[in-house]
Image: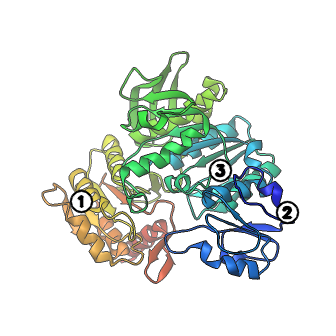
Amino acid sequence: MKLSELLKDIKTNSSYEDREVVSVTDKSSEIVEGCVFVCIKGSRFDGHSVASKAQTLGAAAVICEHSVGVENEIIVENTRSAYSRICAAYFGNPSSKLHLIGVTGTNGKTTTTFIIKSILETLGEKVGLVGTVKNCVGEKEYEASLTTPDSKDLQKLFSEMVYDNCKYCVMEVSSQALAQGRVDGCHFDAAIFTNLTQDHLDYHGTIENYMAAKHRLFEMCDKAIINADDNASEYMVSGTQCRVTTFSVKSDFADYTAKNIVHKPSRVQYDLVGKENIGRAHVNIPGGFTVYNSMGAVICLTELGFDFQSILSALRICMGVPGRVEIVPTETEYTVIIDYAHTPDGLENVINAMREVSEARIITVFGCGGDRDSTKRPIMGKIAGDLSDVAVVTSDNPRTENPDSIIDQIVAGMDGCKAKIVRITDRTEAIRYALNEAKKDDVVLLCGKGHETYQVLAEGKIHYDEREIVKDILNETQTQ
């Protein structure tokens, strides 16, 4: 491929020698003769500092934001955005051959994408999935390391989907990915906004920056499906040119409203009422947030031209998502549930969801991640302490921070809370305590890990699957 082909959609005033290109990268470890190296400045490393190394190793061109004094340098305004577009061109602009559906928001992205994928497949479509739990190309599954992959990995996934004859790709689009331009050059047929609450302020700095990052998705889509009950809903579509469809549980002024909601221990049911469509929705996932997530999915596919009643029929056989209100099989008189809730809003939603279906005690085991937004720690502590009957504060991916210091910050927000507060740093011992504490009909809610099967410690990542932990503890109890 010629360099000029890669740069066709890139604005630059630099003159350059058109050369053959064998690969593109932004990683110094991947520089090879004939590659295009893109200099990206991150929080810990600036790619501009290794531009001379790239030249020495025979790079065909170096893309940079300012002159780095090397041969065949090409200066652009934003190398992150340029890298995304270059990667797209390198793989033949595969996203243009797919119907892209993007989902953004603090909570609900994963469940919404899984519901959409399930419905589409039931309706006979071949679908790709990009998200937190896994990436899929049709029936093939790949491990996911980021909610939205690096630009090169993302475009490679798109190209595999096209090669495998996928027609649709439904993907979670994170605020970091939007801020870093990882999806620049992509155009979405539809985009869904689930909600916005405090998260990722360690990266974005302010809630305003966080909102602005989310807003970018609606600048690159044709149709926007918006949760009108969220305070940020109007902001998300302000100044955009896309067609907007709103949904609500609280207001009849939205385009679609949920009525006659019934909560069951394993599902929710509701009437989905629109100006031209009305039908009964059955979703095999419990919780009030499931109403919102499924509404967004159904409305999105309706807006894309699928038959409304066929969508609702397909929704009936959609199952849950790993690590999202996942019931752990146990032969106990109480229920154990694993959920990914790791934000204030997520924690509040899942505890309230359990309140809707259980009159017994809620025993919540939770922690907060290290090297992440510390301001949400006391907030999450207060939520768990106010809404649970027993709140067990423990470790959750402490990374390089001292786990006890994180717990100190969590419990600082729990003064005066009604719950019995217990702090146990070792997560396995915390789970053991919760299981021993549980009585008939209680709900033991293990929050934070969800689909994850690891803990991230200062020493590195270790295997840690809460399903296995629960099973082992119960087996130990039975043999005693």
- Indicate the quadrant where residue 154 lies: bottom right
The foreground one among 417 and 144 is: 144
Cβ atoms under marks 3 and 2 closer than 8 Å:
no
User: Which one is in front in this view, the residue at disc 1 or the one at disc 3?
Assistant: 3
**How far across and down, in percent of the image, does residue 156 sit?**
74, 58
Categorize mark 3 by other alpha carbons within 10 Å: few (<14), some (14-19), many (20+).
Answer: many
Secondary structure beneath disc 2? loop
Coloring scheme of the render? rainbow
Give the residue number, with chain letter if any, for mark 3. Answer: 129
- Indicate the quadrant where residue 427 lies: bottom left
**How far across and down, in percent of the image, does residue 1 sit?**
86, 60
Give the residue number, with chain letter if any, for mark 2. Answer: 18
Q: Residue at x 28, y 67 (%)?
A: 393
Secondary structure beneath disc 3? strand
Which mark is drawn over residue 390?
1
Which mark is drawn over residue 36?
none
- Work out which residue is located at the far left of the displayed protein and give it: 416
**Three-letter code, disc 2:** Asp
**How far across and down, in percent of the image, does residue 289 sit?**
42, 41
Categorize mark 2 by other alpha carbons within 10 Å: few (<14), some (14-19), many (20+).
Answer: few
**Three-letter code, disc 1:** Val
Q: Is residue 164 visible?
A: no
Q: Residue at x 37, y 48 (%)?
A: 197
